[in-house]
Amino acid sequence: MSRRTVLDLRKKKADNERIVMVTAYDYTMARLVDAAGVDMVLVGDSLGMVVQGHTDTLPVTLDEMVYHTRCVSRGLKTAHLVADLPFMTYRNVDQAMASAARCLQEAAAQSVKLEGGVRMAPTIRALVEAGIPVVGHVGLTPQSVHAMGGFRVQGRTEEDAERVVADAVAVVEAGAFCVVLEAMPEDVAAEITSRVDVPTIGIGAGARCDGQVLVCNDLLGMDLSFQPKFARRYARLEETIVDAVGAYAREVREGAFPTAEHAYTRRGPRKLARLY
Ligand code: KIV
């Protein structure tokens, strides 16, 4: 089986089939979400928050993105692999080209995602002309958290809604094969989805997008203190993991683990036991 291509994903919109995207940051999670049959895996710079423990995505470096994308790449069989270009790594066309090339050449990403609308159109055009598929990202763009005055829903007023729609149309006209719509009223996302001929992938943008993306840690309930309005938990892994590790700790302390069944025995004087 081979990985989904940009053509497969565009065909899904044409066929009215919803697209499923999820983030992953390492080999194990990539293997699991791929086995679950998702269409696209995003190595998001959200890893700055959920893997590195920062309060926003700004500290993430290109080297870190390349490293995590390489790990994820080894775990995927069928999902399309998108790498985020982190903050300050696509300030002009030359820098964007060099950053995107690293994601494709060193980490086997199939496309890159970058944040921004109208102002990013020339950069997107140049990348696409160079053969690098681009996913746009408009609405709430977390790398502009300080400029936006926080992680705020965008497009709530008539004027701001027009700006968000214009941003989405600009990135699509520049050649993006897909666009992420983050944190905007449902009708704004629906308007964009009907106006562009490439898939829209929503996060906090309602049900009328061509697909949805969630951060895997959120959908798996890895941090139960974090419950944003736009996400649904499909598991409570924080509890599962804390309970499991707690049980292990108890058994080690009580001497209940390991038992004889976990211990190696000698077979002969010269034979080395196999570990696996
Ligand atoms: O970094 C990320 O995980 C993202 C998604 C939330 C779309 O950009």
Image: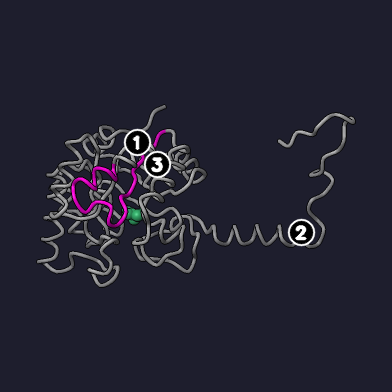
Inspect the magenta stretch and tell me whether residue 91 lies in it. Answer: yes
In this view, the mark in front (2 or 3): 2
Q: Earlier in the sequence, mark 2 or mark 3?
A: 3
In the rendering, which numbered label is found on residue 251? 2
Q: Residue at x 87, y 35 (%)?
A: 266
Rendered image coloring scheme: one colour
Q: Position of residue 246 (x, y in %)?
A: 67, 62
Q: Position of residue 183 (x, y in %)?
A: 27, 61
Q: Are marks 1 and 3 in contact (CB under 8 Å)?
A: no
Q: Are marks 2 and 1 in contact (CB under 8 Å)?
A: no
Relative vertical location of residue 89 with respect to residue 74 in this rendering, above or below: below
From the viewer's side, name the closer residue of 240 and 251.
Answer: 251
Inspect the magenta stretch and tell me whether residue 89 lies in it. Answer: yes
In this view, the mark in front (1 or 3): 1
* Magenta-colored span: 78-100
From the viewer's side, name the closer residue of 206 and 175.
Answer: 175
In the rendering, which numbered label is found on residue 38? 3
In the rendering, which numbered label is found on residue 28? none
Classify mark 3 as within 8 Å of ligand 1 or not, answering yes or no: no
Q: Position of residue 218 (x, y in %)?
A: 43, 58
Q: Residue at x 23, y 62 (%)?
A: 184
Badge 2 amino acid: Glu
Relative vertical location of residue 40 with respect to residue 204 in this rendering, above or below: above
Q: Earlier in the sequence, mark 2 or mark 1?
A: 1
Element assignment for label 3: loop
Badge 3 amino acid: Val
In the rendering, which numbered label is found on residue 105? 1
Q: Residues within 10 Å of mark 2 (few under 14, many from 20)?
A: few
Please indicate whether residue 100 sits to the left or right of residue 236 in the image. left
Give the number of marks: 3
